[in-house]
Image (cartoon, rainbow, N blue to C red):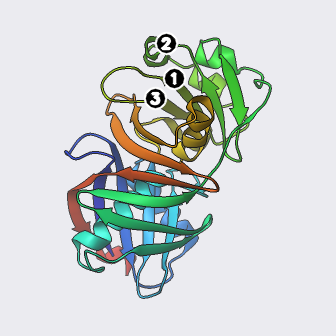
Amino acid sequence: MNIYTVDAFSSAPFQGNPAAVCIVRDEIDLGLMQRIAFEMNLSETAFVRVGEQPFGLRWFTPRVEVDLCGHATLASAHVLWETRLVGQEDKIEFSTRSGILSARKHGPWVEMDFPTEAPVESPAPPFLSDALGVRPLWVGRTRFDYLVEVGSEEVLRGITPDFSLLAKVECRGVIVTCGVQSGGYDFASRFFAPAVGINEDPVTGSAHCSLAPFWSGRTGRNSFTARQASERGGTLKVRAAGERTFIAGQAVTVVRGETAPLFD
């Protein structure tokens, strides 16, 4: 199979969030996909099955298959356009565990249509405050994650989690966010998911399915420019639209290759 490494939510290499994208034409074994993802050792490895419409798409961390991933979907669409498996003006649709997801090009930006995962206010679970080392202003829960609001960007950037303790929180991951009044951004976030093998994800598209409706409720606005404040960092444009959330980013390919004959 052909395999690519793409830096998603970035216009330059070695920034944003790297994802592996494997282009496959036949069904392959679940265990093999998981072993390849473990070998790639990135936060997500995507498997795109071509030759069918919509394209099949599955995502794996080094440890588990996940139900929704933004940056690896962006990377997958980028590869399909870059390799001309899809026309430059064509809309791409993926069949996934979270239903049909789509992507369109708008110049250098790719906009994805994702399901909204609005957080509902809930009590903070045991260990959460201690694991993050901060006092939350607000805590909410989504189908996948906890969302925690903190008071400032300084607090957000200063978080040094206790990952062994954070892994005990029963969820996919923990989104931490705050409002921002500088740099052209509306809000910032970080995403921690040690329970699925990712201590800190560089840029998490799917987290913005929760962040967009959360900040829409806070501000009365629908469109935002967001920054994920990880070490690599990434920029997203997000739009809350009821049951759907539109997430846009840029991407750049940094590695192109193919698997060895042992996979034949």
Q: Secondary structure at mark 3?
A: strand
Quadrant of residue 148 within the rendered picture:
top right
Tell which circle, 2 or 1, labels the residue nearer the N-terminal end.
Answer: 2
Closer to the N terminus: mark 3 or mark 1?
1
Of circles 3 and 2, which is in front?
3
Q: Comparing marks 2 and 1, which lies closer to the viewer?
A: 1
Query: In the rendered view, would you say 139 is above or below 18?
Result: above
Q: Quadrant of the N terminus?
A: bottom left
Report x, y in % for residue 160. 49, 17
Left or right of 168? Residue 86 is: left
Cα–Cα span, label 3 and label 1: 6 Å
Give the residue pinned by disc 2. Answer: 155
Query: Label 2 is placed on what type of residue?
Result: Val
Q: Secondary structure at mark 2?
A: helix
Q: Could you say which is closer to the camera, residue 256 or residue 144?
A: 144
Bin the neighbour count of mark 1 within 10 Å (Cα to Cα): few under 14, some 14-19, many 20 and up: many
Please give the residue where the numbered disc 3 appears in the rendered image.
187
Q: Picture coordinates of residue 169 (x, y %)?
A: 71, 31
Asked if one can make out residue 51 in the rendered structure from this viewpoint, the answer is yes
